[in-house]
Amino acid sequence: MPISPTPLKQTANPLHGLTLEAIVTALVAHYGWVGLSERVPVRCFSSDPSVASSLKFLRKTPWARDKVEGLYLFMLRDIRRAGGAGPGASPPSPP
């Protein structure tokens, strides 16, 4: 019987431990539905948007989920670059 390799640690993965719902909620809080639909042009963000309908679509559509996850990572980098605190932002280091 083959031995399965031990799973790699996900410490460097900023998406590890986050649910898709948390990602969508953070993006909506940051960009709003209009801004989100401009950045990821899918109907679930522009036509009668809701977190539930978005999750249903994103779970079935890998390319759209990849775009949403990429936008979330971009948002985190943008927040860190601006020095603001936000979802996943690093706490300031002590002097």
Image: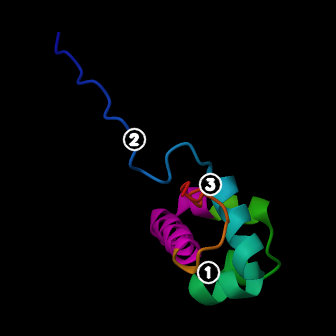
* Residue indicated by mark 2: 10
Q: Is residue 53 left or right of residue 72?
A: right
Could you classify mark 3 by the number of other residues whose Cα lies within 10 Å: few (under 14), some (14-19), or many (20 or more)?
some
The range drawn in magenta is 58-80
Q: Is residue 87 left or right of residue 78?
A: right
Q: Which mark is residue 23?
A: none
Q: Residue at x 38, y 48 (%)?
A: 12
> Pointer 3 and pointer 1: residues touching (CB < 8 Å)?
no
Could you classify mark 1 by the number of other residues whose Cα lies within 10 Å: few (under 14), some (14-19), or many (20 or more)?
some
Please, what is the dominant secondary structure of the magenta stretch?
helix
Q: Secondary structure at mark 1?
A: loop
Q: Colour scheme used in the picture? A: rainbow
Q: Is residue 56 visible?
A: no
Q: Which corner quadrant holds the N terminus?
A: top left
Of the two numbered discs 2 and 3 in the rendering, the one whose residue sits closer to the viewer: 2
> Pointer 1 and pointer 2: residues touching (CB < 8 Å)?
no
Q: Is residue 95 left or right of residue 13?
A: right
Q: Of callouts 3 and 1, which one flags the residue occurring earlier in the amino acid sequence? A: 3
